[in-house]
Image (spheres, grey):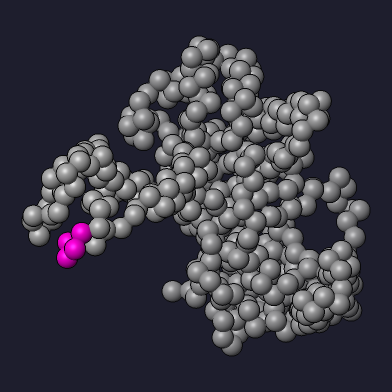
Amino acid sequence: MSKKPSKGGAPSLDMTPMVDLAFLLVTFFMLTASFRMAEPVTVDPPSSIGQVTLPDNHIMVTIDDKGRLFFGISNSTAKMAALRQMSDKYGVKFTEEQIKKFSGLPSIGVDLKDLPRYIDASENERTSFQPQKGIPNDTLKNPQLKDWISFAGKEAVMAYNAAKEQAEAAGSDFKAEKPRYAIKCDGKTKYILVKDAIKTFTDLKIYQFNLITSLEGGGTVTNPQP
Amino acid sequence: MAEIAEDGGGGHGKGGKKRAKKQSTKIDMTPMVDLAFLLLTFFVLTSTFSKPKSMELTFPAPPENIQDQPPIKNGITMLLTKDDRIFYYEGEFRAEADDKGPKTELKELTFSQGEGGLHKYLGEKNKWLHDQVKELDKKLEAKQMADTTYKRLVKQAKADKTTPTFLIKTDDKATYKNVIDLIDELNINIVGKYVVVDIMKSELDMINEKTGG
């Protein structure tokens, strides 16, 4: 594409501004995009008119249609600290490297004693990992979910406070939000299973949740029943 | 990636381009632009759909003493069960008729929009509050009211004693979708007070009688 005007030749066009714009947009989207690894389970949440976006700082329990529980924290510092505490309480040893690797994982749905093996597995192996039975939530004998939530909650609040103090000391603006508890659940799940999970939260005196839903098709009409 | 356009970038149908005598230093930007737009498309498509929406909900703290619970005025109890069915009754539950009123009878609603649907029922039950809030919305839009006043008045209207309180109860066969759909419908109809609570044994028996299981 020669810029030189030619008589009767192909008309030439200065592409520079377009390219500038294209690269500007590429840069913008690249910087704003947040990459997430594939979740261990796909859930299809019901739709609602809820407009509240999920806060960035959250602790999430995912429940699939069979009632398996998955647990995830968005804050990686709190995630590592929570794993350390879980490791102490249940006597499962983790290497520093495993703890670090764990902080990059999305939600997990395995028993703590299987977790080291799960962390070491490759991304492809994780999807078919056995046994992926969900996090045990036996209130009396094996309250792992409760401990995860309680440790992660405390750590996330601590991380939030630390960040806040640091920002205040530096005199800069502080924009982070307090951690919120989110529940993501498949539409077909029996509500009684969700109730058990919510009971775990209310036992820890956590009463406010963000229930994750997909966006309604538009308008204020609810889905007609088939 | 870039090549010096010495022979017209190739592929130009009309050959024999007029060239300057000096060697051109122009770079063919097409491949770079192609790449830029490819990346742009990729990032646009991957980033927009990533933020999930959510619905904020507060669950009641378990009462320390069951006896201390104040009775709910204007209560409407919604019972969710299998096959997306909804039963409801108004007021207090009575297993048998007594001097305060007759025995509780369950009525049925559907999730549909038409006659006998949840939407219509809620529209009637919550008309007062709905109209109040709409009125306030109009005033806010016409800038006759400050944001803070609007919020305060909406809160006040929602807490009004005459508006019904909805109790959502589920049996062990209702799905999560039913609960969310019901709460969503309550939100659409601007219901101010609703809560998800445990079902009572007597209510469960009554549902089982209706659904035959």
Q: In the figure, is residue A12 to the left or right of A96?
A: left
- Residue B57 visible at all: yes
Which of A198 and A10 lies nearest the eye of the viewer? A10
Residue A72 place in picture, x, y as percent = 56, 36
Which of A82 and A56 lies nearest the eye of the viewer? A56
Residue B202 place in picture, x, y as percent = 70, 64
Q: Residue at x 34, y 54 (%)?
A: A14
Q: Residue at x 77, y 33 (%)?
A: A172
For the C terminus of chain A, give its image quadrant: bottom left
Query: Is residue A45 part of the magenta span, yes or no?
Result: no
Query: Is residue A9 part of the magenta span, yes or no?
Result: yes
B201 in relation to A108, above or below: below
Q: In the figure, is residue B127 to the left or right of A216?
A: right
In the figure, residue A51 lies in which quadrant?
bottom right
Which of B175 and B37 lies nearest the eye of the viewer? B37
Q: In the figure, is residue A154 to the left or right of A129?
A: right
B188 in relation to A123, above or below: below
A147 in relation to B162, above or below: above
Q: Residue at x 61, y 32 (%)?
A: A75
In the figure, residue A177 lies in which quadrant?
top right
Residue A153 place in picture, x, y as percent = 69, 33
The secondary structure that most of the magenta stretch takes on is loop
Q: Residue at x 23, y 51 (%)?
A: A2
The magenta-colored residue range is A6-10
